Amino acid sequence: MIILSSHTVSRLKPPPCLSRWIIAAFLLMTAACTASHPDLSNNSDFRSFRDVGERLRAEVQRWEGTPHRMGGTDRRGADCSGFVMRIYKDVFSICLPRTAENQMRTGNRIQPNRLRPGDLVFFRISRKTRHVGIYLGNSEFAHVSAIKKTGISRLDNKYWRGVYHTSRRILPGT
């Protein structure tokens, strides 16, 4: 057991200017990710599911060819959940959790036959490995693959159909 005197504890405190900087940084980070879920039904940019799908496809095209990089969240390299997190932030101003496991706990569970553009689709690749993509419509989803980089795949593909796990709806008003 270590016993610290009040003199020792006071020496462990960061300088006041550092404390203020840490607090300011924390407030800026949380403010950036506390955007409320937009009501897309009243948003002139998103008048229909088709508009959501078209906006997503346009953004995914900008990411085309981005290589897989574990832990990455930008066009220099991204993993599946980092890609999904950034697309949602950039297109919808919605902050999602960083990992596929936590993204899978967000929103409402939906059946595969009820998928709409913008829904998240999750796959169980192995006992411990999860994968996530964004449904675009017409049985297609966008994702980052370690093999094919960023791109679009089909849910009715034999491989993806075999590892499909669940779907979640995040977008309100759609």
Image: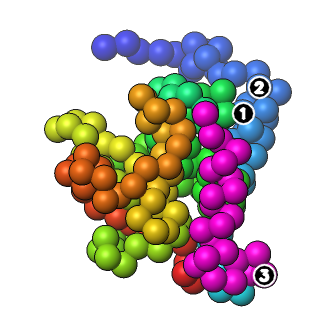
| Horizontal arrangement in the rendering, residue 49 relative to residue 153 (left or right) | right
Q: Secondary structure at mark 3?
A: loop
Against 34, is 100 above or below? above
How many neighbours does mark 1 have within 10 angstroms: few (below 14), some (14-19), or many (20 or more)?
few
The quarter of the picture where the N terminus appears is top left
**Colouring scheme applied when the structure was drawn:** rainbow
Which residue: 66% across, 79% down? Answer: 40
| Tag shown at residue 18 | 2
| Horizontal arrangement in the rendering, residue 114 relative to residue 88 (left or right) | left
What is the chief secondary structure element of the magenta stretch? helix
- Amino acid type at circle 1 is Ile
Front residue (pair 22, 102) = 102
Residue 12 falls in image quadrant: top right
Against 39, is 89 above or below? above
Against 114, is 151 above or below? above
Q: Secondary structure at mark 1?
A: helix
| Horizontal arrangement in the rendering, residue 171 relative to residue 14 (left or right) | left
Residue 89 visible within the image: no
Residue under numbered circle 1: 22
Residue under numbered circle 3: 44
Which residue: 47% across, 74% down? Answer: 116
- Amino acid type at circle 2 is Leu
Compute the Cα span from label 3 to label 2.
43 Å
